[in-house]
Image (spheres, rainbow, N blue to C red):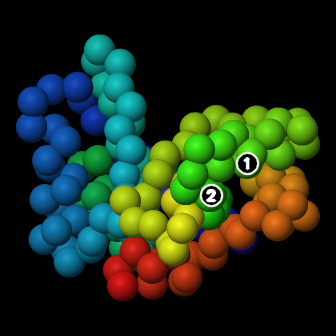
């Protein structure tokens, strides 16, 4: 059960980060969470919105280079060692984590994290086998907006 994320390539210059946010806002698209990674000359803005295809279309129409990637959202116990336990499951299953970031909301006593795996299907199977809740798109959007 994967969800979709938009990835945008941005020049690493003042004002470039606000432009895609303004484009999405004008189109009525809410950003549920995002991550930003940079180098000296460019950055990659990764974000999750409810309507990924619409978000991609409006951003491309505004001149941005956008790709869609599959990511996995999971609940992680929000306590010392909670993340370490999930990472151990993933490492024991020999699945590589390319990157991860967190949502700004919690789910009861759990944090919600987004993972980009080299093999999402294998990661989901491993996590579910160990009782880790993998969150689907509809449930995730309802929690984030709700």
Q: Which of the labelled discs sits on residue 36, or is there none?
A: none
Tell me the quarter of the image containing the N terminus.
bottom right
Image coords of residue 65 (percent x, y): 36, 45
Query: Which of 38 and 74 lies nearest the eye of the viewer?
Result: 74
**Mark 1, residue position:** 86
Label 1 crowd bin: few (<14), some (14–19), many (20+), radius 10 Å: some
The outermost residue toward the left is: 15
Residue labelled with disc 2: 76
Disc 2 vs disc 1: Cβ atoms closer than 8 Å? yes
Instruction: Determine whether, in the image, residue 61 is placed left or right of residue 4.
Output: left
Gap between marks 2 and 1 measured at Cα: 7 Å
Position of residue 32 measured from the top left corner of the image (x, y, whole percent): 36, 66
Q: Earlier in the sequence, mark 2 or mark 1?
A: 2
Q: Tell me what residue is drawn at x 36 percent, y 85 percent.
A: 146
Residue at image coords 43%, 58%: 103
Q: Residue at horizontal 51%, vertical 72%?
A: 107
At a point 83% along the width and 46% down the height, the residue shown is 89
Which residue is the extreme one toward the front?
Answer: 80
Image-quadrant location for residue 13: top left
For label 2, count other residues whose C-alpha is less than 10 Å away and answer few (under 14), some (14-19) or many (20+): many
Towards the viewer: 4 or 143: 143
Q: Position of residue 18 (x, y in %)?
A: 14, 47
Q: Position of residue 35 (x, y in %)?
A: 39, 44
Q: Mark 2: which secondary structure?
A: strand
Q: Is residue 6 visible?
A: no
Residue 100 seen in the current view: yes
- Residue furthest to the top in view is 40
């Amino acid at each position: 059960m994967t969800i979709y994320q938009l990835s945008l390539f941005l020049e690493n210059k003042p004002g470039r980060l606000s432009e895609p946010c303004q484009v999405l806002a004008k189109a009525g698209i809410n950003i549920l969470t995002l991550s930003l990674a940079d180098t000296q000359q460019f950055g990659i803005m990764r974000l999750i919105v409810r309507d990924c295809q619409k978000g991609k279309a409006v951003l491309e129409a505004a001149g941005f280079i956008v790709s869609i990637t599959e990511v996995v959202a999971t609940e992680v116990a929000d306590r010392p060692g909670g993340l370490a336990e999930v990472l151990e499951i993933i490492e024991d299953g020999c699945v590589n984590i390319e990157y991860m970031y967190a949502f700004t909301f919690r789910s009861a006593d759990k944090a919600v994290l987004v993972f980009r795996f080299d093999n999402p299907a294998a990661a989901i199977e491993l996590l579910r086998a160990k009782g880790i809740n993998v969150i689907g798109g509809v449930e995730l959007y309802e929690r984030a907006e709700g």
